[in-house]
Image (tube, helix red, strand yellow):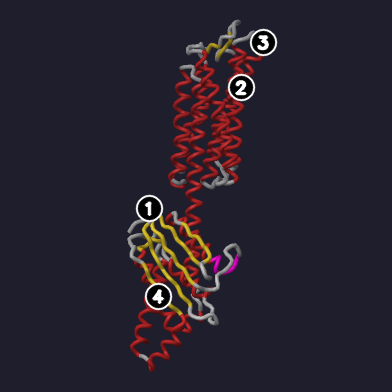
Amino acid sequence: MIFWYDLYFIYFMGGATLLLSFLGLWFIAIMPSIDRWSKRFFRILFTDLVLLSLNGLSNLVLFRNTVPAVLLYLTIILEALLLSMTLPMMTVYLLHCCGENVRSSKLFHAVLSLWVVFACLVLTAPFIGGFYHFTPDNRYYRDSWYPLLMVPVLVLMLLNIVGLMRRRKLLSRKKFLSFIIAMLPITVMLVINTFIEVYPLVDICVVLSALSMYSLILSDQVEQALNRQREIANQRASIMILQMRPHFIYNTMTSIYCLCDQNPKLARQLIMDFTTYLRKNFTAIASATPIPFSSELEHTRAYLAVEQAQYEDSLFVDYDTPHTCFRVPPLTLQPIVENAVKHGRDPYAGPFYISIRTQKTDSGSKIIVADNGRGFNTTDDSEPHTALQNIQQRLEIMCGGNLTITPNDGGGTVVTVIIPDSITN
């Protein structure tokens, strides 16, 4: 007999199932990160679960009123079909995640055949008899053949689990976990339902499994998207290194050549500074994690020493960096300074001054690079602005940092970098 638990509990479970199903649809509507195929799949899945929940609530209303028996049988058939449809859908999504062709998959053909057998049994059960029946007062009773009705879906779920285990190496850890969380509880509840009437619990178990599966799939895809962004940011950094300005290298080598006779000591120092600059540049390619700020500062000092050797008395640098115990993404400070020298220095406007300062703040560390150059419009798509945008993206991805650009009092530009406290030396 179905009414072994309190009727209010049944209403509560039905309402909770409907609410969670709508919640799944709402999450799909507001979450943009999931791919289009997965989004369409989960939209269909949760729509099916909404219909399942509405049908379940209608069952409760019909069971409490005098209605034709055919209507009662129809709602039971719809509930069984709507619930069972989610099982082959999991097979389809598993094959999609593994990159297999659904139409040529033996697993899908076997699962679909079992579902068709189950659907045929559900449709013919009211006419055959022996599976379940209703009393004149709308009470639902299972008959002795009912366990046979559950055999196809139980075998179907076992095939899904076996298919998942055989394909586990083709899935990411989170995707594999999402399928496990979705399949195992449903299988357990179906086994219990074979011997004890717990259909409302099966319904809510399916919805909770679908929500858990969706959450893990979404988390996995967001993580993959962040990894792709991190790779793109690192590639941009590598390109920036490999595309060093040819005229900068040419001018540096020319300066070294001229100094060999005029000032050999300075020439040797310039060679050392230029070597340090090149070494730091190429070392940065291999670094995928934040580095000590002291290393980035050394890189910047080497670069500015080379530039000062070429511009002599027209480039002046002031260092005020008492705080260096923190980490930054490689190629953070040096490209900011190079960007300032390259685009801010005006050879007809007198000496060019750059100041580099660091500060310890309550929430992290601050780097301030200020110059008295020409400045630029922070809202355009010019080359200097694009370079700083790339640095900003790498800061966000690698350490949750931030970069801001403001005009300097009296002319020029101020670039401020904020590094959160979670990145320590």
How many numbered marks appear?
A: 4
The quarter of the picture where residue 83 lies is top right
Q: Which residue is drawn at 60% across and 17% down?
A: 59
Specify the quadrant that holds the C terminus: bottom left
Judged from the image, the secondary structure of the residue bearing numbered disc 1 is loop
Q: How crowded is mark 3: few (under 14 residues within 10 Å), some or many (20 or more)?
A: few
Residue 260 relative to residue 78: left or right: left
Residue 191 image position (x, y, % from top left): 45, 23
Sooner in the amino-acid sequence: mark 3 or mark 2: 2
Q: Which amino acid does label 4 sit on?
A: Tyr
Which residue is labeled 4 in the image? Answer: 277
Q: What residue type is labelled 1?
A: Asp
Please, is residue 3 above or below residue 228 in the view? above
Q: What residue type is labelled 3?
A: Pro
Which residue is labeled 3 in the image? Answer: 68
What distance separates the C-alpha of mark 4 from that of mark 1?
A: 32 Å
